Every structure is written in structure tokens, then in C-alpha cells.
Image: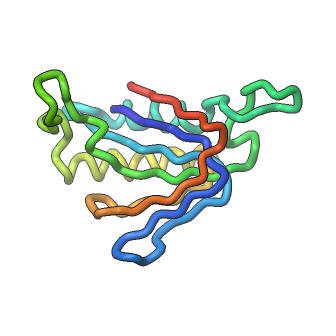
């Protein structure tokens, strides 16, 4: 399981020109589910996202989590994170989990994030999503569990 976590000031996600989700401040987490990923990995990555200390404290050091700063999380399923570009220039997505199983692990991750006391907004699994985000920093972290 892989996630790209970005610190943001504001983000909105639309499908077919209609606003689906938005957050004012916090994290956008793009989540890729690979074949063989487990419920335990989904729980572990949710924990990492919730407690990742990438927000500045009073001394300007990245020492606070999204929970600490009262931010929200926009969790977006992104199978393209499972792309393999090791052979040629066209990515292979054969490592991505089948949609039904991937969706279940994505939803479990969202539930576990909520279990850590976070407000979590979602994208639309499998949809052609348009995302506008105002990155903060920018700060982007890659997590792989």
C-alpha cells in the first residue's frame, strides 16, 4: 500500500463538474492499493497519516500532526500509484488490486482515520476526479507500508 500525503491550505474535488468534497486545511492523501495488501496495512497507513508530524509548531519546526492542528483529511483513491515504469515508458498497472478489494481497503482506511478523531472527506472511487489544491509548503511525503 502506498500513499502520497500532501499538506494543503485548501482542496476541492469534483466529478462531472459537481463539487463532491472539499477541505479548508489539512492533508490530501492519495492512496494506492496493491495486490495482496491487507486490512492490517490499511490500518497502519491510516495511523501514519493521522500522526505524521509535518505541520509547523511555534518554533517553525515540522513537529505537529494533522490531529494536533485540527486539520481535515481528503482521502483519494489513486490506483496509478501502483504503476510500474521499470520496463519502457508506459506504466503497467498489473500490480494494482482489483477494484472491489481496493475499494474495501480504501474505505477501511477512511474509517480508521475517523477512528483517530479526524474529519475525513472522500473522493469517488473509480471516477474521473478533478482536484484543485493549494499546497502548503509544498510538503509531500511518500508512505509505503
Q: Position of residue 3 (x, y in %)?
A: 42, 36
- Residue shown at the point (82%, 31%) measured from the top left: 57
Could you tell me which residue is drawn at 82 percent across and 28 percent down?
60
Q: Is residue 13 left or right of residue 37?
A: right
Q: Looking at the image, how many numbered discs can be counted on the residues?
A: 0
Viewport quadrant of the N terminus: top left
Q: Is residue 13 left or right of residue 59?
A: left
Q: Is residue 93 above or below residue 119?
A: above
In percent of the image, x 52 and y 47: which residue is there?
A: 28
Q: Nearer the viewer, residue 77 or 11?
A: 11
Query: The C terminus appears in which quarter of the rendering?
Result: top left
Furthest toward the right, the residue is 58
Q: Residue furthest top?
A: 86
Apparent side of residue 5 relative to residue 55 in the rendered image (left or right) = left
Query: Please, is residue 118 above or below residue 50 in the view?
Result: below
Q: Quadrant of residue 84?
A: top left
Residue 98 to residue 45: above or below:
below
Image point (88%, 32%), residue name: 58
Q: Position of residue 2 (x, y in %)?
A: 36, 32
Please provide percent x and percent y for residue 91.
17, 35
Front residue of 49/132: it is: 132
Q: Nearer the viewer, residue 52 or 140?
A: 140
Amino acid at each position: 500500500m502506498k500513499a502520497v500525503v500532501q499538506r494543503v491550505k485548501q482542496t476541492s474535488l469534483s466529478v462531472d463538474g459537481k463539487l463532491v468534497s472539499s477541505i479548508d486545511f489539512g492533508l490530501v492523501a492519495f492512496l494506492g492499493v496493491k495486490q495482496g495488501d491487507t486490512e492490517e496495512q490499511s490500518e497502519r497507513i491510516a495511523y501514519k497519516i493521522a500522526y505524521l508530524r509535518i505541520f509547523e509548531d511555534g518554533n517553525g519546526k515540522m513537529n505537529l500532526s494533522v490531529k494536533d492542528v485540527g486539520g481535515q483529511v481528503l482521502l483519494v483513491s489513486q490506483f496509478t500509484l501502483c504503476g510500474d515504469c521499470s520496463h519502457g515508458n508506459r506504466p503497467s498497472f498489473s500490480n494494482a488490486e482489483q477494484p472491489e478489494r481496493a475499494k474495501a481497503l480504501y474505505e477501511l482506511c477512511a474509517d480508521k482515520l475517523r477512528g483517530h478523531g479526524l474529519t475525513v472527506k472522500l473522493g469517488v472511487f473509480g471516477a474521473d476526479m478533478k482536484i484543485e489544491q493549494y499546497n502548503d509548503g509544498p510538503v509531500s511525503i511518500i508512505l509505503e507500508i
